[in-house]
Image: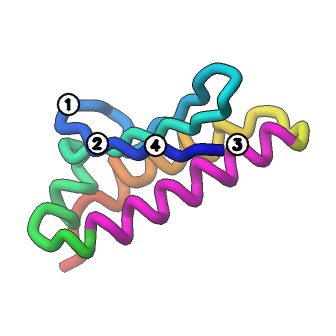
Amino acid sequence: MLVRIALVRAHESTWRNRGSNGPFRILEIRVSLAHPFMISFAQTDPEDVEALLRVASAFALAETLARKSGVQLAATIRRNLNDILRDALSQPST
């Protein structure tokens, strides 16, 4: 399986999206730099972005493997993760 990761600046409501392409098994992952979580925590240090891309990739691969093994509604974890990062965890603690 080939994994393709893209950082996007479009205003998306999700931090991470995934998609599979055709018979060649390409897993496409889009991480939004315009997401409130990324704006708060990953705008200055490239190492922060790399670490978050690795976490996003791990979640996308885990979702794909779960779906392949028959787990129904595997995307629920991604939707919940996106909601939590956007709503509850996008602001630094004081």
Give the residue type at disc 4. Arg
Whole-angstrom CA distance, mark 2 to mark 3, is 20 Å
Residue 88 on the magenta span: no
Q: Earlier in the sequence, mark 2 or mark 4?
A: 4
User: At 20% from the left edge and 64% from the top edge, which residue is drawn?
Assistant: 42
From the viewer's side, name the closer residue of 86 and 66.
66
Q: Is residue 66 above or below residue 59?
A: above
- Colour style of the rendered protein structure: rainbow
Q: Contact, CB < 8 Å: mark 1 with mark 4?
A: no
Horizontally, is 70 left or right of 40 in the view?
A: right
The image quadrant that residue 6 belongs to is top left
- Around disc 1, counting alpha carbons within 10 Å, would you say few (fewer than 14), some (14 to 19), or many (20 or more)? few
State the predominant SS element of the stretch in magenta. helix
Q: Earlier in the sequence, mark 1 or mark 3?
A: 1
Instruction: Locate the C terminus by quadrant.
Output: bottom left
User: At 32% from the left edge and 33% from the top edge, which residue is drawn?
Assistant: 13
What is the span of residues highlighted in magenta in the rendered image? 49-68
Q: Secondary structure at mark 4?
A: strand
Whole-angstrom CA distance, mark 2 to mark 4, is 14 Å
Residue 55 x, y percent position in the rendering: 48, 64
Give the residue type at disc 1. Ala
Q: Which mark is residue 10?
A: 1
Whole-angstrom CA distance, mark 1 to mark 3, is 24 Å
Q: Which mark is residue 25?
A: none
From the viewer's side, name the closer residue of 88 and 30.
30
Q: Contact, CB < 8 Å: mark 2 with mark 4?
A: no
Q: Secondary structure at mark 3?
A: helix
Task: Tell which residue pokes out farthest to the bottom in this image.
Answer: 94
Dot 2 corresponds to which residue?
32
Dot 4 corresponds to which residue?
4
Dot 3 corresponds to which residue?
64
